[in-house]
Amino acid sequence: MDNDLPAGYELSTDPDRLDADLVHRWLSQDAYWALGRPREKHDLAVASSLNFGVYERSAGAQVGYARVVTDRATFAWLCDVYIAPEARGLGLGTALAAAVRDHLAPYGVRRVLLATADAHEVYAKAGFVALPKPDWWMAIVNE
């Protein structure tokens, strides 16, 4: 499941490999969309989702994370995508998004959505496009 990961990195959906403390710290302290997220909320989100970790092969250290909320049938939402600062610029974010896409493909999920303020080009390389009919979509936003 390593898709197009750079040499020396591997991807896993094994929840036991996740460094829960590290992922929470990344998201709650450094990710604009999750700043201040309480640990209890984070743990519930992780437990209720399909999780992807990116790891350095040699050291086994986690350097990336993504979470997918899905029914594994019709819909998926890719969220909480994070690459550690020291591992950025290597193509890990795009490879991670592509791995999620490929992992979901056998389920026949009709829509995989995500939201980003600043990484459109990363996700475009994995096949994501702007919503084709944005006027069809609505949201309840509780910020």
Image (cartoon, helix red, strand yellow):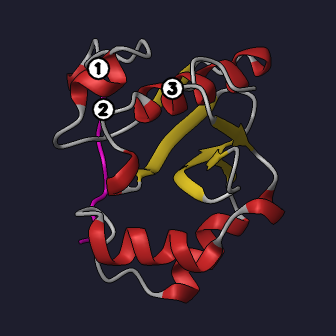
Residue on which disc 2 sits: 137
In the rendered structure, which disc, 1 or 2, sits on the residue that comes first in sequence?
1
Crowd rating for badge 2 (residues with CA inside 10 Å; few <14, some 14–19, many 20+): few
12 or 35: nearer the viewer? 12
Magenta span: 136-143
Residue on which disc 3 sits: 95
Label 2 sits on a secondary structure element that is loop
Residue 119 falls in image quadrant: top left
The amino acid pointed to by label 2 is Trp
Residue 57 falls left or right of residue 23:
right
Percent of width and height locating residue 121:
23, 22
Crowd rating for badge 1 (residues with CA inside 10 Å; few <14, some 14–19, many 20+): few
Label 3 sits on a secondary structure element that is helix
The amino acid pointed to by label 3 is Ala
Residue in view at x 83 percent, y 64 percent: 16
Q: Is residue 53 above or below residue 16?
A: above
Percent of width and height locating residue 101:
59, 22
Label 1 sits on a secondary structure element that is loop
Is there a contact, CB below 8 Å, between mark 1 and mark 2? yes
The quarter of the picture where the C terminus appears is: bottom left
Q: Which label sits on residue 131?
A: 1
Determine the CA span between mark 1 and mark 2: 9 Å
Is there a contact, CB below 8 Å, between mark 3 and mark 1? no
Residue 136 seen in this snapshot: no
Residue in view at x 33 percent, y 69 percent: 34
Residue 131 seen in this snapshot: yes
Q: Which label sits on residue 72?
A: none
Q: Is residue 116 above or below residue 125?
A: below
Q: Is residue 138 magenta?
A: yes
The amino acid pointed to by label 1 is Leu
